[in-house]
Image (cartoon, rainbow, N blue to C red):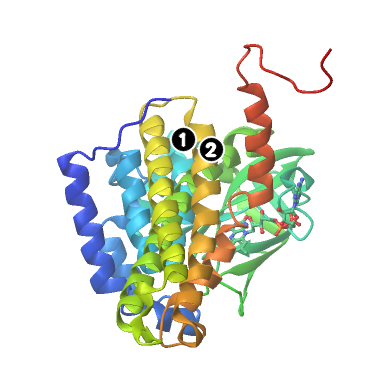
């Protein structure tokens, strides 16, 4: 795999803009949003006005059409400030990307301009009570009627489900996995808020109940039977890419907070930064974060080049970045001692958010299984010592 790490002047400029937005408009409020378990309406408006919700929407429909690396930088900087805001970009991006990639001309013209401006917020509703990692266990059903479809089933853990205007939702049509665009006001759809979640608390999660839910004919996205293998797969790949970059930002935030605290706090007559065991934690955070950023950049360049290798590169990036974020967050709390457990510093939020990153968009274990399997396929065909008994 080729790697390129140099940002173009435009990408560097975009990163500076995202960094300054996050510093001014996200960081000062993120702890309050976490406590209140919601993001205020005024933020959605400001965020949308800046074009950040249109990041994954093609320019011809009013979106930013960001290249993959610039989209990654947006996620990294937001992830540094608030994983819930980054989650908004993730799920809204997944819904937008799916419409752009799989929608008919009519669906694209109907939804994309609204998704680009934030007039409509999109969410991704795949998980069910009996179908999480095992997406093939999908049990929601759809049946044809004279003028559209009727949907029945339950969806769980829908990020920004409380706030969404349209759900990219998956159900079985004649037994085949199929994607639908379900508007919030579809008759028969009930949205219930989920509260008290461990991390990404401001991401306004919801449970959805579909009870003979009526949608129009043009709600079907892509072809029947292509819901998981095509529509969900491409949306999840974008989601995984977005989360991976968000984790780089989260790990960086852990490092930044730890550096600042270890510089100030003194024990046994010296600053924490002078204790070698604290230095070990700082060194691990710095190295893990730098490596995660490189893996994300590699995935970004490959995605931009439309290389088939980008899928695998994204798995590596998400696996490494999410596990690094969790370890870094745990060490950041450790560096802060009791102060890390209280509400005065953001590191306890980072730890709660980082745990969620190891579960969403393909859990750590599923990634390990996938990466290990592909490592066998990528094995060089040269003869290597196999060990075992020798003559
Ligand atoms: C904050 C949050 C936001 C979410 N947002 C969304 C959303 O917007 N849309 C959506 O559709 N879903 C969402 N989810 C759901 C998420 O995608 C699922 O939680 C995830 O797919 C895992 O499914 P599960 O929780 O049912 O765990 P399970 O699939 O029941 O797995 C439980 C544990 O077993 C492990 N495991 C399972 N199978 C294997 C295996 N074959 N080998 C080894 N280990 C295995 C898993 O890694 C995990 O550790 C969200 C979840 C959370 C917590």
The one nearer the camera, 273 or 6, is 273
**Could you give the CA–CA distance between mark 1 and mark 2, rounded to whole angstroms?**
9 Å
Does residue 66 appear to the left or right of 376 in the view shown? Answer: left
- Determine which of the numbered discs, if any, sits on residue 377 in the image: none
Q: In this view, does 90 lie above or below 43?
A: above
Q: Report the residue at 59% width, 42% height from top.
A: 232
Q: Report the residue at 41% width, 52% height from top.
A: 287
Q: Is mark 2 on a helix, strand or loop?
A: helix
The one nearer the camera, 119 or 143, is 119
Residue 244 x %, y % = 47, 50
Q: Report the residue at 24% width, 53% height from top.
A: 15
Q: Report the residue at 61% width, 79% height from top.
A: 195
What residue is pinned by disc 2?
234
What residue is pinned by disc 1?
101
Name the residue at the front extreme.
391
Residue 230 x %, y % = 59, 33
The one nearer the camera, 303 or 153, is 303
């Amino acid at each position: 795999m080729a790697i390129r790490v140099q940002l173009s002047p435009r990408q560097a400029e975009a990163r500076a803009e995202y960094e300054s937005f996050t510093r001014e408009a996200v960081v000062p409020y993120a702890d309050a949003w976490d406590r209140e378990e919601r993001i205020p309406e005024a933020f959605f408006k400001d965020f949308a006005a800046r074009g950040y919700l249109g990041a994954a929407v093609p320019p011809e429909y009013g979106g930013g059409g960001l290249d993959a690396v610039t989209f990654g930088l947006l996620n990294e900087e937001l992830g540094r400030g608030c994983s819930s805001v980054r989650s908004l970009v993730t799920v809204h991006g997944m819904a937008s990307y799916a419409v752009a990639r799989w929608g008919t001309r009519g669906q694209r013209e109907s939804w994309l301009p609204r998704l680009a401006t934030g007039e409509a917020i999109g969410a991704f509703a795949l998980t069910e009570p009996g179908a999480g990692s095992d997406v093939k266990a999908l049990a929601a059903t759809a049946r044809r009627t004279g003028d559209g479809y009727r949907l029945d089933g339950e969806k769980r853990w829908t990020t920004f489900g409380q706030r969404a205007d349209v759900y990219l939702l998956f159900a079985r049509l004649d037994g085949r996995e199929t994607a639908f665009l379900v508007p919030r006001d579809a008759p028969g759809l009930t949205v219930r808020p989920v509260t008290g979640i461990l991390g990404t608390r401001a991401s306004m999660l919801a449970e959805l109940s579909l009870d003979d839910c009526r949608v129009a004919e043009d709600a079907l996205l892509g072809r029947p039977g292509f819901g998981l293998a095509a529509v969900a797969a491409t949306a999840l790949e974008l989601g995984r890419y977005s989360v991976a970059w968000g984790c780089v930002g989260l790990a960086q935030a852990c490092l930044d907070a730890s550096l600042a605290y270890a510089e100030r706090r003194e024990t046994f007559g010296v600053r924490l930064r002078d204790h070698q065991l604290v230095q070990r934690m700082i060194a691990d955070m710095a190295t893990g974060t730098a490596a995660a950023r490189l893996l994300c950049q590699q995935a970004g360049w490959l995605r931009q080049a439309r290389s088939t290798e980008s899928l695998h590169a994204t798995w590596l990036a998400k696996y490494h970045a999410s596990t690094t974020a969790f370890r870094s967050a745990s060490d950041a709390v450790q560096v802060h001692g009791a102060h890390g457990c209280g509400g005065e510093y953001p590191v306890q939020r980072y730890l709660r958010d980082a745990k969620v990153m190891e579960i969403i968009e393909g859990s750590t274990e599923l990634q390990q299984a996938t990466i290990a399997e592909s490592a066998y396929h990528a094995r060089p065909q040269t003869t290597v010592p196999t060990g075992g008994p020798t003559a």
